[in-house]
Each structure stands twice: as C-alpha cells, then as structure tokens.
Image: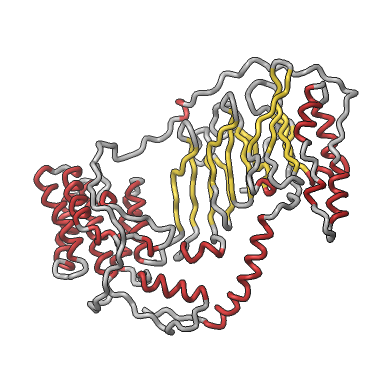
Amino acid sequence: MSVRSDRKSMKNTLLIIPLTIIFLVSSCAPATQSTPVPIVDNATATPSPTPTADATRTALPSATLTASITPLPTIPTFTPTFDVSTIVTVTPAPKAECPKENPELTLDLHLQETRACFQSVAGTNKNPSDCINRNIQNDILDYLNQGGTINHLISQIQADGQKENVSFAYKDLTNDSIRDFVFRDTNSPYDGYHIYSCNNRIYKTASILDGDPYANQASIYTIQDLNANDIPEVVIKIAEVLIVYEWDGNSFTELLGIRDFGESTYEIQDIDKNGTYEIILFRGRPPFWNRLAEFPWRHYTSIYSWNRSSYIISSKRFTSPEYRFQAIQDADQYVLSGEYDQALTLYQDTIINNKLDWWSIDRKNYEAGLLLGNSKLPVMLNKDFTEYPRLAAYAYYRIMLIHLVQGHASDASTAYNTLQQKFGNDQYGHPYVEMATAFWKAYQSTHKMYDGCAAAIQYAAEHPEILIPLGSDYHGWQSHQYKPEDVCPFR
C-alpha cells in the first residue's frame, strides 16, 4: 500500500508551527483567569459535560525485551463489581466553633487597586508582579480570627465585577457542619487555593496547588460528594488537567490527577447507577510537540471509577482502529475485561478486513518526516508484507483461547487447525503457530488454562521477537508494550 505526501500542505503546516508554539508558550505564562464560577452555600455545580501472498522479506525491528518469565499468580478471571453498600461513610465531626463574629470589622482586599495597577504597567518597563498583594492570604486569616465575616469577603469579591480577579467557594468541605471558605487570587501566578476552616474558635488554612506553575489557570470545576461517603470532593480544572481532592481529617488528599494536556473534555456521571460517580475523559488531539511520539494517534474515552480509596481508570476505549495492530491491541483489551464477543469481532477483522492499514518502523519514520516537512522523502513507501501473517496468525491463536475459556472445544479445535493449515509453513506466521502448539499440548494434557498459558508464556519469553509486531516503541505512545505474560491472560 502506498503512502502519499502533500508537500504544499506540509509547507503550510510548518508555517503555522511557530505561531502555534508562541501561542502555547503564552498560554503557560501568568495571566488573569477568565471569569470563574463561584460556588456559594450548597448549590451543586453541573459538570460540563483499521493480504497479499507476497513474501517480501523485511527484517523485524529491534527492541529491548526482558526474557525473564513472569510467575503466574492465582488470580480470578474477573473483577468483582464494586458494591456501594461497602462504602464507609464518615461520621460527622462535632460542629465546629468559630471565633465570635464582629460585623463591624472590615477588610479591604485591594482588588480594585491591583487591577488598576496591572492596567497602568501594561506597555511599560514596570514589572506587573509588583502589583500583587503577596500577603492577601494571611490578611484574610487574621481578619477571620479577629471576628471578620466571610459574608463581607464575598460581598467584596462580588462587588463591581471584582469576582473576575478571584476564584472562591463557600461550602462545608470537612463534614463538620460549618462551611469552609475557598479562595484564590488569580492575579498571583503561582498561588493555589487556600481553604479557611474554623475549629476550637480559631481559623486555620490548608492549601492545594500552592506553587504549581499552572495554578494561574486553575478554576473550580465542581464541589460535590462523588464517592458517597458524605464528604464532598473539590474538583479543580487546569486547562485540560483535572484534579480531585478530598479532606482526610488532616489535609486535602489528591484522589485523582488526570494530567494530560491536549484537546480534552470531561463529564461526571453515575454511569452504573450504584451511587458513586464516574469521571469521564474525552481525549482529543495532543499538543503538536507530542504528535511525533504519539503518532499514530486515536481519540479515546477513559472512565475513572471509585475503588474505595481512590479513583482509578476502569475503562479506556479508542475510536475504531485504522491499523491492523490497533485491532489486535483493542481485542486483547476486550479479553481482559471479559468482553469476548467484541474481542472475537476484532480478531476476525485482523484476519479478513482489508481496510485495516499496515504499520512498520519504516512507516513510522516516514510519517514523522512528512510531519516535519522533509522534502527528500520518496513519494511512495513500499508496503511491509510481513506484518499481516504475523498478526493474523496471532489472531487465530487468540480466537482459539477465547473458545476454550468459553467451553467451546470444537470451535477451538477448528481455530487451531486453521492456524496450522494457513501459517504452519509461513516463515513469518510460523512462530505464532509454535506458540499455539505449545499451549495446545499443555492444555490437552490437563485441560487447565493455567497450564496452557504457562507454556505459551514460556515460549514468548524464549522468543521475545514475536512480541514486537504486536506492540512496541515504534507503534506510538498509545501502544501497549507487549510482555510475555500478555500473550495468555487466563489463569
């Protein structure tokens, strides 16, 4: 199959790159945050929501692989569904006592003066950082401990559009029946959120994101109880980054940090209706400087679920495969989650779908050259005819495994015999036939998947070159890097 280059289009792309870099650099510089949505009282924010018979020889790319054999632990073949009834809710702490309020006590946060100062130094040689009140957090703490009221602070923030200069919330974050004041001065580039909580008649502060180089872009995405333990989580969004914090009794602990920059959107939903919320990431194209490493790139959706102690990724689904190796990797992932019908469809596509494209280390380098505008590249790149027999033979082997684990011995025997007939004498597919044979002999002697898998994994450990076409460094950052134990996941 040929790969064609549109030179004119590439030149235009290269003209755009400097402008893109300038934009990206400027976006990381301290800047005034766009108008945040304040969260006051108990209002709940709504989250925004891919063969011919030609046997052309191509050397297999080199890769660094460890030939050690990974032990086979005795593990279940499924992951139990999270039971919401096992959630341990936190007994509310005794109602906190705050300092006696003095309504006549006032505090000027000097927000108007700060804004005016920024405007006055624009276009001059003066340093805008000189306009920042670097003691504002301590000023607030002293004010509250002297009896100042949070209502006065909120009134000041909301007056005359000054809320554009700050991000704040006023909700009970510690489950002690007293609302906490969350404040961030967006004029200060590295200033995170300061959370003011009172107990024993004194206010204390806790901080999140303080000193983070991207803190100036942070905003409160939502504050709500996501894991059904009666303590609300504080969800902070920084560009395409999402971070979840929760009070653990002493400090605000990070429960999840999705630190992927690129075109991303998020939703928070209780997908499985079990009482805990899932965090859904819709991931688009990465920043330009990562595309060379991440190519070939697919959009994907990741779901993060609560596991009793933190949020972990429970599902990652890519858009439909464009390349044959992607179909293999997606099918293997479906097997791990027990979705055998979807896996079988993709293994069959690997074998018979001629619309799935080929991939090789030469193509990886060729595509990278196109992206960089290399004018010395050939107009066409010769197809690698060795990939298909390797991946198709592996697909037959995996189909055999699925039929066995489902108890379909006759179908498994058919898949095994077809693999032998089609690729037994093929120099590229033959190693996968040998692996399947090692599995088949061990399985037939005991009829245990564990024993068959042990033999297949042993073969892969002794012949690590068979793992490279399945997923290695030249397949891009999204690719799984295959290890011997990946060829047979049944225990």
Give the left or right position of residue 285, taking residue 324 as reference: right
Where residue 455 appears, x then y in whole percent? 16, 49
- In terms of depth relative to the viewer, which is nearer, 81 or 250? 250
State which quadrant residue 197 falls in.
top right
Give the left or right position of residue 203, taking residue 450 as reference: right
- Outermost residue on the right side: it is 104
Give the left or right position of residue 329, taking residue 137 as reference: left
Residue under the point 23% across and 41% down: 72
Give the left or right position of residue 130, taking residue 331 as reference: right
- In terms of depth relative to the viewer, which is nearer, 97 or 420? 97
In this picture, is 363 found above or below 248?
A: below
Question: Dividing the image into 4 quarters, which one contains the C terminus?
Answer: top left
Where residue 21 appears, x then y in whole percent? 63, 65
State which quadrant residue 99 falls in.
top right
Residue under the point 76% across and 31% down: 138
> How is the protein colored in the picture?
secondary structure
In this picture, is 276 found above or below 318?
A: above
Residue under the point 63% across and 37% down: 208
Question: Dividing the image into 4 quarters, which one contains the N terminus?
Answer: bottom left
Where residue 422 appears, x then y in whole percent? 18, 68
Number of on-image labels? 0
Where residue 111 appears, x then y in whole percent? 84, 42
In this picture, is 26 found above or below 208?
A: below
In this picture, is 4 found above or below 198?
A: below
